Image (cartoon, rainbow, N blue to C red):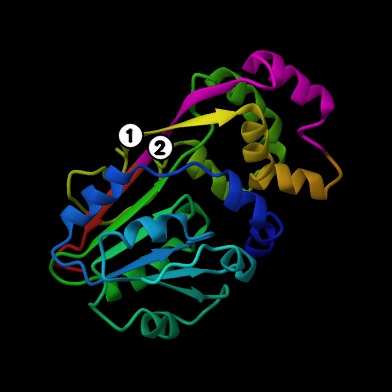
Amino acid sequence: MAELFSKQAAVYAAVRPDYPKDLFAKLAAATGQHRLAWDAGTGNGQAAISVAEHYDSVVATDTSAEQLRHAAPHPKVRYHHTPEGTPEEDLVAALGGEGCVDLITVAQAVHWFDLPAFYAVARRVLRRPGGVIAVWGYNYRVSPVEDLLARFLQTTLPYRDPRSRLVVDGYRDLPFPFVDIGLGREGEPMSIDMEQEMSFEGLVSMLRSTAPVTTAKQQGVDLLGERVVKEMEEEWGGASLVRKVAYKAFLLAGTLSRDD
């Protein structure tokens, strides 16, 4: 999976939507301290930089070295490459040891993780009490072009990794064994609107950056061929039109139980 995202790292960094500032403010308000945060699956560092507005330092990890090469530098963010299979002890050590992380964030990535292994590390490094873990994502639910994207979604299904079903379903079936703090819980994610202006070129570029489109391309299938793009352009309202859109994101956040 790291190799797949490495091949689209530059495009991914340029076209993904911005996360709302109040999301990070809410998460920061939920933690007891603000010394250290861990942004796992950081990609281009987009979430890590926003987290850094509220914490003294952020460790941002990713399995893709190429993604990290495209990450934006920040004085409070330390990027760290964690190849797939990194031993648990090494990862805990890289994060500063047990019980030292105030906030763990995972933006648009947790569905790719080995969840039992990731949650085991999270339990070890989260501060007790007061540490919070938050995961969120978004899918093809983008208002007001949901119908357009729903039809496109159907063409991607043969090229989807089975794990992506979690994000397509809005994390409703994502295991999340943490104590509810009022910001979405297992089986009941909290809904978040991520509003931004988008050009038609931006829409197509965003779709090109997705994993199934990249996988299809590797197999000789162009899901965004000339005819498809032309039909999308007509439904969008023209190539020059810039529209205000809202991604329908979903959030789960929690803390450790006394038994963890």
Looking at the rendering, the stretch of residues picked out in magenta corresponds to 222-250
| Amino acid type indicated by mark 1 | Ser
At label 2, the amino acid type is Ala
Most distant residue in the right direction: 220
Q: Are marks 1 and 2 in contact (CB under 8 Å)?
A: yes
Task: Give the quarter of the image for residue 56.
Answer: bottom left
Percent across and percent down for residue 50 are 36, 55
Q: Which residue is mark 1?
A: 191
Mark 1 or mark 2: which comes first in sequence? 1
Q: Is residue 54 left or right of residue 62?
A: left
Name the residue rendered at 36%, 52% in the picture.
135
- Identify which residue, 67 or 147, lies in the foreground: 67
In front here: 207 or 164? 207
- Position of residue 132 measured from the top left corner of the image (x, y, whole percent): 23, 60
Q: Which residue is mark 2?
A: 249
> Is 224 one of the magenta-colored residues?
yes
